[in-house]
Amino acid sequence: MHQRIKRNIPVVTGVLTVLSLAFVFGAVLRVIPSTVFPHVSSLIAVIPHLNAVISLTAIGLISAGWYFIRTGAVEKHRFAMVASFGLFVAFLALYLYRVILEGPTTFLGPSVVKTYVYLPLLAVHITLAIVCVPLLYYVLLLAVTRPVSELYETNHRRVARIAAPLWLVSFFLGVVVYVLLYVVY
């Protein structure tokens, strides 16, 4: 199985991307019935705050991973990036659980802020998150199917140089959206 994935990274990336985005859009568009999941009110209430902490931690780990690879600390880099991907999965699972059960959060601020600040930030955040999905799967699959010595012969570095900054900006904008939704308004 490992060798099969290793030989078919683009195909596996495509399949994982389609499945992941189908689940995300299914949740956001309310196609997935809310009756499938238990409704735990106490968990739902803390998810936005927990996801903000997860996002800030992921920003720190991605930044650390970037630093580690630049200083040649490959194992630390690998740990930081795999951990940040794990946080991304946790963030997404919590977010989708909440959206499936409660729907998207309504922005309660003034309409001028909503139109000219909140919605554009949200649009960029969502767009970057969608763009990052295949990039992250691709670099992660390359990293977990090859020894470090082989990674230098792949597109891992080239794609990661695009994925990491986009991922950082997406997480950062997610925190800004959180602040607008739950702190400012």
Image (tube, grey):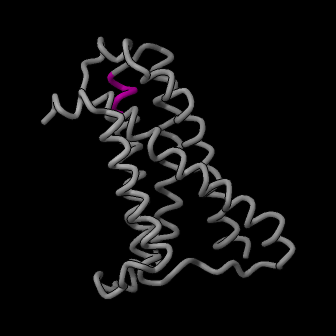
Q: Is residue 150 above or below residue 44?
A: above
User: Residue at 30% across / 14% down in the picture?
Assistant: 150
Q: Is residue 145 magenta?
A: no
User: Residue at 69% across / 78% down in the picture?
Assistant: 107
Viewport quadrant of the C terminus:
bottom right
Q: Position of residue 95 (x, y in %)?
A: 45, 68
In this view of the protein, which residue sits in the foreground, 13 or 177? 13
Q: Is residue 76 magenta?
A: yes
- The magenta-colored residue range is 75-79
In this view of the protein, which residue sits in the foreground, 164 or 179? 164
- Please tell me how many numbered marks the rendered image carries: 0
In this view of the protein, which residue sits in the foreground, 106 or 24? 24
Q: Quadrant of residue 180?
A: bottom right
Q: Position of residue 158 (x, y in %)?
A: 51, 22
Viewport quadrant of the N terminus:
top left
The chief SS type of the magenta part is: helix
User: Residue at 53% across / 60% down in the picture?
Assistant: 52
User: Residue at 34% across / 84% down in the picture?
Assistant: 40
Q: Is residue 177 left or right of residue 141?
A: right
Q: Is residue 130 above or below residue 146?
A: below
Q: Position of residue 177 (x, y in %)?
A: 66, 63
Q: Position of residue 136 (x, y in %)?
A: 43, 40
